[in-house]
Image: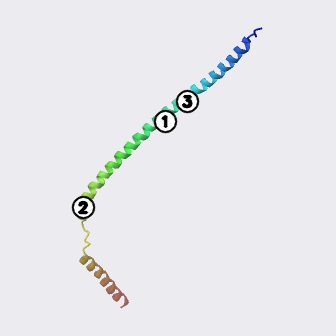
Amino acid sequence: MPQAIDWEAQIEEIRRKATAAARHSERTVNGVAQTLSQVGTQAQLLVKIDKEQQGITNRLGSLERKLIEELDHAKVQPMKGANTHPAVLLRWLSGVVLGALLSGAFFWS
């Protein structure tokens, strides 16, 4: 004798599986939507950071060019008033020592 097929149980089983699949799909779609919104925000932040970095790079480049120009200019022109010749330094030092001796001699007398 053939067995009777329990259509109600099969329909109920399919309904539970379909409901579980729908919940899973909804979670997946919501997760993807949330991820896409975060990606958009992160992309905007990266664009802003890139612009700031380009500005800093440009500023550093201009400062470097200015520094190189100033160094080249300083190499061409010696410092005004800076007389570091050894004879001049020796004369200056001997003048200081002589002045100290004379002021000490006048102070003690």
Q: Give, as a three-letter code, the residue at label 3.
A: Gln
**Where residue 53 sits in the image (x, y, percent)?**
40, 43
**Where residue 71 sits in the image (x, y, percent)?**
27, 58
Badge 3 marks a residue whose secondary structure is helix
Q: Are marks 2 and 3 in contact (CB under 8 Å)?
A: no
Question: Compared to 108, does 36 lie above or below?
Answer: above
Taking the view exactly as shown, the residue that stands out farthest to the top is: 1
Q: Is residue 54 left or right of residue 86?
A: right
Q: Residues within 10 Å of mark 1 (few under 14, many from 20)?
A: few
Residue in the foreground of this view, choosing between 93 and 62: 62
Taking the view exactly as shown, the residue that stands out farthest to the bottom is: 109
Mark 1 / mark 2, whichever is N-terminal: 1
Q: Quadrant of the C terminus?
A: bottom left
Badge 2 marks a residue whose secondary structure is helix
- Residue at 26% x, 54% y: name it: 69
Where is mark 3, residue-wise? 34
Within the image, what quadrant is residue 102 found in?
Answer: bottom left
**Where residue 17 sits in the image (x, y, percent)?**
66, 20
Where is mark 2, residue-wise? 75
Q: Give, as a three-letter code, the residue at label 1.
A: Gln
The Cα–Cα distance between marks 3 and 1, rounded to whole angstroms, is 12 Å
The Cα–Cα distance between marks 1 and 2, rounded to whole angstroms, is 49 Å
Where is mark 1, residue-wise? 42
